[in-house]
Image: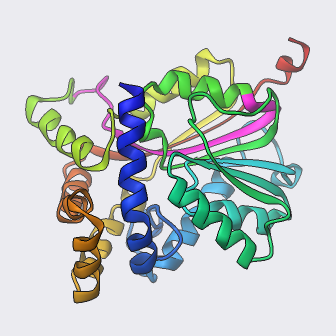
Amino acid sequence: MSSTLNRDIRRFYDASSALWERTWGEHMHHGYYGRSGTRRVPRRQAQIDLIEEFWNWGVKAGTPSASEDRPQQILDVGCGIGGSTLYLAETFNARATGITLSPVQADRASERAAAAGLDDRVRFEVADALAMPFPDNSFDIVWSLESGEHMPDKAKFLRECDRVLRPGGLFLMATWCHRPTASLAGALTDEERRHLNEIYRVYCLPYVISLPDYEEIARALGWEGILTADWSAAVAPFWDVVIASAFNLETIQGLVSSGWQTVQAALSLGLMSKGYARGLIRFGLLAARKSEYSRAL
C-alpha cells in the first residue's frame, strides 16, 4: 500500500504544484483567521499568520520560555515548494532541510532557496517520511504542517520523527483529523465515512485519525510537555476563500493542462468546506518534546 500511495502522492503534487504556486503562492497550507475564524485578512497573509501563530503556540510545549528556542537545525516534513522551510530558516537564521515525495516540488523549492540567497543553509530532498535518510538525533525542530494526513502509518511516522529529533527537541505538527469518537457523538457514521472516503480519494490520503488518537501515540513515545489544540474554527474560512479564487479563466486553463486528478481536486474543494461545517473535519495541532532522558539511552 505504501509504495502505491507514495507514487500517487508524488504524481499528484508533480502535476499540480506549479498551478497552485501560480494561483495561490508558495504556501500550500491553510490560513489563520483568528481563533474564532472571523478575522478578515488577505489569504496569503493568513497563511503566514498560521506559521507564526502555530510556532508561538507550540514552542510553549515543555519549556518555560520561548526564548530558549532558537533552533539551529530544522526539519520540515512534507515541505511542498519550501514556503514554511524558507520562512523558518530566515526567521531564526537557522539551517533547514525540507523533504517531500515530489521531485518537482524539491526542485522548485531549491530554486526558491537560491533566489532567496538561502541555498547555503537550506536544502530539499526527495524522501519518505516513514524512512528518513538522516542519523538519529539530527534536528532541534521537526515541523510537519499538513503532511500527517498523507502518512499510511501514523504511529510509525511519529516514531520516525522521534528518532531524528534530538533529546529535548521540539515536535510541531498540524494535520487534518476527523472528529473525536470517544464522546457523546460516538463512532463515525456510515455517511461520515463516505464523506471522508471521498476526501481520501481526491487528495491521495490513506486515512485520518482524531487528535486524541495522535495524543495517545505521543504519550506512548514518552514525549513530554504535550500540547494539543483544535483550530478548526480558525482555519475553516480558508476553503471558501480558495473556492472563490479558484474559478477564473487562467486557473481553469491551468487545471485542464495539469490533468484530471488536479481538476477533481479543484472541483472537490467543497468537500473540505462542508466537512468543517458539519464538524467532521478537524484541524488538529500537536506539540511535544522528546524526553531529555533519551540522551542516556
Range shown magenta: 164-184
Q: Is residue 168 magenta?
A: yes
Q: Can residue 34 be seen at all in this image of the molecule? A: yes
Q: Quadrant of the N terminus?
A: top left
Residue at the far top in the pictured view = 297
Q: Residue at x 82, y 43 (%)?
A: 64
In the picture, measured across the screen, residue 272 lies left or right of residue 13, that is: left
Q: Is residue 266 above or below residue 247?
A: above
The spot of residue 109 in percent (x, y) is 62, 64
Q: Can residue 82 be seen at all in this image of the molecule? A: no
The spot of residue 137 in percent (x, y) is 82, 30
Q: Quadrant of the C terminus?
A: top right
In the picture, measured across the screen, residue 227 lies left or right of residue 242, that is: right
Q: Is residue 161 above or below residue 105?
A: above
Residue at the far bottom in the pictured view = 249
The spot of residue 237 in percent (x, y) is 33, 68
Q: Residue at x 39, y 67 (%)?
A: 37
Q: How is the image coloured?
A: rainbow
Q: Is residue 114 above or below residue 72?
A: below
Q: Quadrant of residue 266?
A: bottom left
The answer to which of 96 and 283 lies nearer the viewer is 96
Residue at the far left in the pictured view = 191
Magenta segment main secondary structure: strand
Number of labels in the image equals 0
The spot of residue 275 in percent (x, y) is 22, 50
Q: Quadrant of residue 122?
A: bottom right
Q: Residue at x 31, y 38 (%)?
A: 178
Q: Is residue 38 magenta?
A: no
Q: Residue at x 21, y 64 (%)?
A: 263
The answer to which of 75 and 49 lies nearer the viewer is 75
